[in-house]
């Protein structure tokens, strides 16, 4: 194989191309100028998207990854550039999103001397990455990059950071291209005995409930999950990360489970005799109180990460392995189950706790806006959310039929995530409208990324559910803190979001009544360019159902006390 004499920056770009990377999100600075110089030379092969802030770059790489399953890549300089990536890296880590973050640093001889714009970014990100590297020898750079991508995409996906001192970027060595390593997904622990024993437990169940998470989507196992549910005749509930892994229109879909889960899903969790968790991690927002979660049921847990087994909920049985592999081997072992009585109970609960369609008249409600977004755009758009009440309304009201059509910050709950992630998803899916559902608090954090969407003419629609308060915190203050609304009012000198959006170059709509909603959505979709729809709603609209902190999932509140 021919060897080339290249500098470190060129080796980095060659390795990115080797890994199939054609898109990078980043922001330049002094310690990555050699990398940006190399990007200039390779501009016909790699597209660089300049975001407005490094955090926006990390969220864009994350959105790119979640909407495609590919590894997202972001790039920043040393010091504050690197630390600005940290929230985005942590967000990707909590939600198992494959990302490679590349940072520059001071020259190797200057490390550890408090040099200008120096931080120990590998030390800072150690707890929030699958692995991280600092490259101190240019001869090790190529293999480090290859290893980083292999780690990011293998087993349970996640972010990896590569820190490259600036002198390593300019130093030269021989380079030889290599074929990328295929991603590895854990399957060595999936044995015939394990599968047969799991099948026996499933056959003994009378009231099975399937609970799925983001692992189904990461594993590309939606088809196998649908087959599994059909054989069992079992209802399926999802975590926020699992939305889209099982079609919302399927008659056995019962919605999200947990703190803001549907009354149907939470009730079934208290009544089932067998809970099958697939690619889910029993987070506290799902379980709430371990003693009050599926306490009458045996639990079968299927997950690629052995560390998740028995971590939050004790299981009767578990299979460690890639979800797609497990289900593809388990499904042929199963017999069609007759759960007529259990199915009737599901139907009874759905009739008792219907998902109410909000009114098209009177005061504008956030839930009405999201229900109309679902009706008008769910078959053609990718949905992203920021974090707060609007996020929970989206989880409860959007009808998502396919994987990777719903992107949200689940584990970290990152306000400001949505618009950057929407930019990444739009870049990854040319021509597909990407709708970010945000609150006004989140929009105040990330509106600068409108400039990015406008610069690249991306079909991103920002829908701001604007109640002029930090709604979720206010809801807690109202219910549990005696209505002491401390620091949650955003009234003050209110920013005009329409004028702000227009200043960035986006098309903006102001919506104050239900009658205006459809028109604004349809116009924004037709424009196929960056748009903002500011929806003015009341400050006291709350998210229900809700399970109070520390209560079991069956102890949900359906509405505020009179």
Image (cartoon, rainbow, N blue to C red):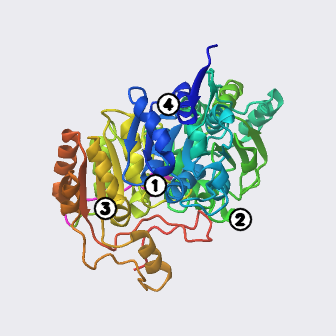
Q: Which residue is mark 3?
A: 465
Q: Nearer the viewer, mark 4 or mark 3?
A: 4
The image quarter containing residue 138 is top right
* Alpha-carbon span between mark 1 and mark 2: 38 Å
Mark 2, Cα crowd under 10 Å, few <14 / some 14-19 / many 20+, is few
Q: Residue furthest right?
A: 193
Q: Nearer the viewer, mark 1 or mark 3?
A: 1
Q: Residue furthest top?
A: 1
The image quarter containing residue 464 is bottom left
Q: Earlier in the sequence, mark 3 or mark 2?
A: 2
- Decide which of 160, 372 is in the foreground and name it: 160
What percent of the width, then of the height, locates residue 472? 43, 69
Up-down: is 415 above or below 456? below
- Decide which of 363, 320 is in the foreground and name it: 320
Circles 4, 3 touching at the beta carbon (< 8 Å): no
Mark 1, Cα crowd under 10 Å, few <14 / some 14-19 / many 20+, is many
Mark 3, Cα crowd under 10 Å, few <14 / some 14-19 / many 20+, is many
Q: Quadrant of the C terminus?
A: bottom left
* Alpha-carbon span between mark 4 and mark 2: 46 Å
Q: Which residue is mark 1?
A: 55
Question: Looking at the rendered structure, which numbered label has been put on residue 288?
Answer: none
What percent of the width, then of the height, locates residue 72? 50, 39
């Amino acid at each position: 194989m021919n060897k080339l004499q290249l500098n470190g920056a060129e080796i980095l770009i060659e390795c990115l191309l080797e890994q199939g990377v054609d898109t990078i999100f980043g922001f330049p600075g002094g310690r990555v100028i050699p990398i940006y110089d190399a990007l200039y030379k390779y501009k016909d092969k790699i597209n660089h998207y300049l975001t407005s802030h490094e955090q926006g770059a990390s969220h864009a790489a994350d959105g790119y990854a979640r909407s495609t399953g590919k590894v997202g890549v972001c790039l920043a300089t040393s010091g504050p550039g690197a630390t600005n990536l940290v929230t985005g890296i942590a967000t990707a880590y909590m939600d198992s999103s494959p990302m490679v973050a590349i940072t520059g640093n001071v020259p190797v001889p200057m490390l550890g001397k408090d040099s200008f714009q120096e931080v120990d970014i590998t030390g800072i990100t150690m707890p929030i990455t699958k692995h991280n590297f600092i490259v101190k020898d240019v001869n090790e750079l190529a293999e480090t990059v290859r290893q980083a991508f292999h780690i990011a995409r293998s087993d349970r996906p996640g972010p990896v950071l590569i820190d490259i001192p600036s002198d390593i970027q300019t130093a030269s060595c021989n380079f030889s291209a290599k074929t990328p390593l295929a991603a590895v997904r854990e399957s060595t622990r999936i044995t015939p005995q394990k599968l047969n024993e799991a099948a026996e437990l499933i056959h003994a169940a009378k009231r099975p409930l399937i609970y799925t998470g983001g692992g189904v989507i990461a594993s590309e196992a939606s088809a196998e999950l649908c087959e599994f549910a059909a054989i069992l005749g079992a209802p399926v509930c999802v975590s926020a990360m699992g939305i889209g892994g099982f079609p919302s229109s399927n008659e056995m879909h019962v919605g999200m489970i947990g703190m803001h889960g549907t009354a149907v899903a939470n009730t079934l969790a208290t009544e089932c005799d067998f809970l099958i968790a697939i690619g889910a991690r029993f987070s506290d927002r799902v379980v709430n109180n371990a003693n009050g979660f599926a306490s009458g049921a045996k639990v079968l847990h299927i997950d690629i990460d052995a560390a998740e087994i028995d971590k939050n909920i004790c299981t009767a049985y578990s299979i460690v392995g890639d979800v797609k592999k497990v289900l593809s081997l388990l499904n042929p072992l199963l017999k069609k189950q007759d759960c007529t009585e259990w199915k009737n109970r599901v139907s009874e609960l759905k009739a008792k706790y219907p998902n109410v369609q909000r009114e098209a008249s009177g005061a504008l409600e956030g839930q009405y806006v999201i229900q109309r977004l679902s009706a008008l755009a769910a078959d053609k758009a990718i949905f992203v959310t920021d974090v707060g009440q609007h996020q929970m309304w989206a989880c409860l009201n959007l009808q998502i039929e396919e994987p990777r059509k719903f992107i949200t910050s689940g584990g970290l709950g990152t306000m400001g995530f949505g618009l950057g992630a929407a930019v990444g998803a739009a870049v990854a899916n040319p021509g597909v409208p990407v709708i970010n559902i945000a609150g006004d608090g989140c929009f105040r954090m990330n509106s600068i990324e409108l400039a990015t969407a406008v610069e690249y003419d991306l079909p991103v629609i920002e829908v701001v559910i604007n109640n002029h308060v930090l709604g979720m915190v206010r809801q807690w203050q109202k219910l549990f803190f005696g209505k002491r609304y401390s620091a949650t009012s955003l009234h003050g000198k209110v920013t005009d979001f329409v004028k702000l959006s227009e200043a960035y170059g986006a098309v903006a709509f102001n919506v104050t009544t239900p009658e205006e909603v459809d028109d604004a959505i349809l116009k924004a979709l037709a424009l196929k360019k960056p748009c903002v729809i500011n929806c003015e709603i009341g400050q006291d609209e709350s998210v229900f159902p809700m399970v109070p902190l520390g209560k079991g999932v069956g102890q949900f509140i359906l509405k505020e006390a009179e």
